[in-house]
Amino acid sequence: MYWDIPIHALFHVDNIVNIYMLSPLQKFIDKIKKSGSENIQKIKNLFTKNGQSTFTGSVGRESLKSLLSNNVCEIRFVRRHPKFGYKMTRQMVATNCLEILESTNAKISLNYRRPTKARQINHDRYNLVLVWDILMQDYRCIPMESCVVLNTVYKDNFWYFYNNVLYPMSSRDKLTYMDH
């Protein structure tokens, strides 16, 4: 019954962690900017390839599949099935880039494994995209009705991004980021 649930469980408030937490990528960028102008080029190289900047914004299903096949993206979307005690939006760092995922580093650091079963649902029918969630280290389906790409990291820069941004995050940081 509802009265058996403690009152603090009804409201999801991070009273210790900053409620307006920046993405880990933005925190890293701010840290590099504070360290000096010679490191600004590292930031520019992380988000550009051949002088072109990365894509951010709302995206369609086929565009996201294409983007994820060669890049790693920070993605935010509205949950199809809301979870009690969590926000309506979910954020993740995801990819489908086989060059990254099939590497020895990914098999060790990201616990990547190829799918062993056939798909249980028709992703086209339900407007979903199957991706490898880097933080949760498992496959996830993204609903495309409200998907927004926040940042894109090119595959050539992924391990730098992973070692300097994702790896240092604590478990609590990761959970807070995903529920942002």
Image (cartoon, rainbow, N blue to C red):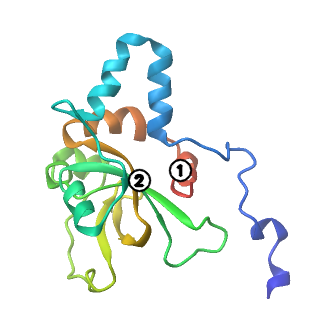
- Apparent side of residue 132 relative to residue 167 in the rendered image (left or right): left
Q: SS class of the residue under badge 1? A: helix
Whichever of callouts 1 and 2 sits on the residue coming sooner in the sequence is 2
Residue name at image x 29 percent, y 86 percent: 125
Q: Is residue 110 visible?
A: yes
Residue 69, x across and y down, in percent: 18, 56
Residue under numbered circle 2 = 135
Instruction: Give yes or no for contact between labels 1 and 2 (Cβ–Cβ under 8 Å).
Output: yes
Residue name at image x 58 percent, y 49 percent: 172
Q: SS class of the residue under badge 2? A: loop
Q: Residues within 10 Å of mark 1 (few under 14, many from 20)?
A: some
Front of the two marks 1 and 2: 1
- The residues bearing labels 1 and 2 have C-alpha atoms spaced at a distance of 10 Å
Residue 43, x across and y down, in percent: 35, 26
Residue under numbered circle 1 = 177
- Apparent side of residue 80 relative to residue 116 in the rendered image (left or right): right
Picture quadrant where residue 144 is located: bottom left
Q: Nearer the viewer, residue 5 or 23?
A: 23
**Amino acid at pointer 2:** Leu
Residue 7, x across and y down, in percent: 84, 70
